[in-house]
Amino acid sequence: MEAINFANIRRRLVDLPTDHDADGEHRPTVGDVFAPEQHASALAPSTLIVVGARGAGKSFWAGVLGQRETRQLAAEVYPRLGLDRVTVTFGYNGFDTSSAVTRRTVEARTQSGGHDLALMFWQAVLLRSALAAINDPEGKENIATFTERYKDPEEFEARLRYVDQALEASDKTCLVLFDALDTLSRDWAQLTKLTDALFEACWMLRARRRVRAKVFIRPDQLNDEQLRFVELPKLRSGRVELNWSRSDLYGLLFTRLAEAEQKAGEKDFEALCRQTGYPVPDTNAERLRKWELAWSDDAQRRVFDRLAGRYMGKSATKGATYPWTYKHLADGRDVVTPRSFLKLFVEAARHTPSPPSQAITAEGIRHGLREASKTRVEQLALEYPWIKRALAPLAGLKVPCQSREIHEAWIASDTVAVIAKAAASEGFLPPYQKSLTNGAEEDLEAAMSRIGVLSYRTDGRADMPDLFRIASRMLKLGGVALKSKS
């Protein structure tokens, strides 16, 4: 049997990128792309609303669609979607690009008016983006000038029909992407107004054959009770959620590992796969479509047992390694994100010592969970700047517990007032809009539940998943320890 140098595999794991998203500094490459079958409908031009938590891949898929090379790979993997005939532009993505409007522009053009002004603004953004897709000079014009020119509904509709016909003649579809909507405003009322108007503007495109929009949005924004767009129930029912199954995430891990090894010119992981009965295909498209390690639980478990050992201890009493990682990375809504999953394995590979016959160990996996927990809270704080202030007073609290114990910890530290003051001075969205029926602590608890930081037992007690509990230094009988025993 061919000898395998597990130290080489360990080094490739350490070097894996843990960010399954895209921003101003990171763009997906062909080697980054792993496309679960259930995500096909998220990429389809006909899907308007794509929902996902931070780290689930909203901006990643927006980045895949927004680049010709990665879009072409997606077209090969999902040929029925017709992505090879799609031209993509950005309407808004949270940072400055050639076609997207910036937050400052949105504020300047919509702050002084109500819903109708915001609707007219988003319609102008959509039309300008569509004109850019057909290389019309108007696609490069200043948005203020453009909005003024097409404020008349008939002028707007006539120009949109012109674009639609031009696209039809060339057998192309223009897809306008909207991402990072949480950055549109630091005020809940303004954010709700802008989101409502954007939904209406995108919904109005349904009469067009070749101009489409796609909105990537957080679950809590889509479920904002203050949204008033009359067709919102239809948008919600037609949404696609970026959920990742256990086999999807292991498929992502193994395809990324195979890609990294290929770039490094090494053969150890390839040899392990071949010995286990699952040789690595030569091309990206074949790995995504045909390789059993991309989708088969049985195949993945066999390979993972070779990489990490079979159990989280000396026997089955501590649990099997393959399901353990997914179970302990789930948030309160049973969602596991690629970012947290990959982070666990990068940190597990860094943990020492490692035996020569494995790439990672059970204790390395537990260490990886602790590091993934810290990182997840840090990342969550980028989207919800109030979260650390809500978690800090809960250190030392044992879960599961009664909600009143959480409320008492917040009251003792004046947490609600601290968050409100920070939101006002630092300019971030507070965790909730004050309700008329609940107390402030109840509203804060509900906000944490909505984003998956808190969950509840069948007896009504509040619980916190390990993904957040460990970084928050909360205790749990029988749970993963806050510190390594080594």
Image: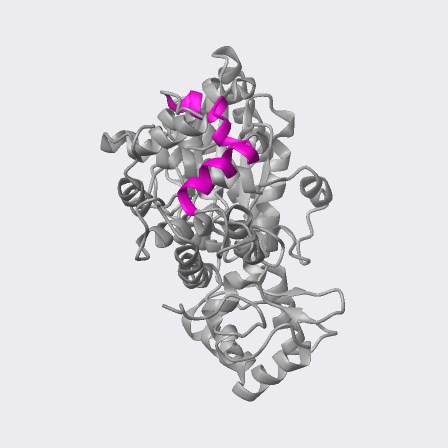
Rendered residue at 45%/50% (across/down): 106
Rendered residue at 39%/21% (across/down): 281
Q: Residue furthest bottom?
A: 412
Residue 102: percent from left, percent from top: 39, 48
Rendered residue at 48%/68% (across/down): 470
Vertical arrangement, residue 275 with respect to residue 148, above or below? above
Residue 114 visible? The answer is no
Residue 299: in magenta span: yes
Vertical arrangement, residue 411 with respect to residue 400, above or below? below
> Is 176 left or right of 234, judged from the image as shown?
left
Q: Which residues are magenta?
A: 283-308
Q: Quadrant of the N terminus?
A: top left
Q: Residue furthest left?
A: 265
> Is 207 left or right of 312, judged from the image as shown?
right
- Viewer-closest of 137 and 178: 178
- Viewer-closest of 145 and 88: 88
Residue 428: percent from left, percent from top: 46, 66
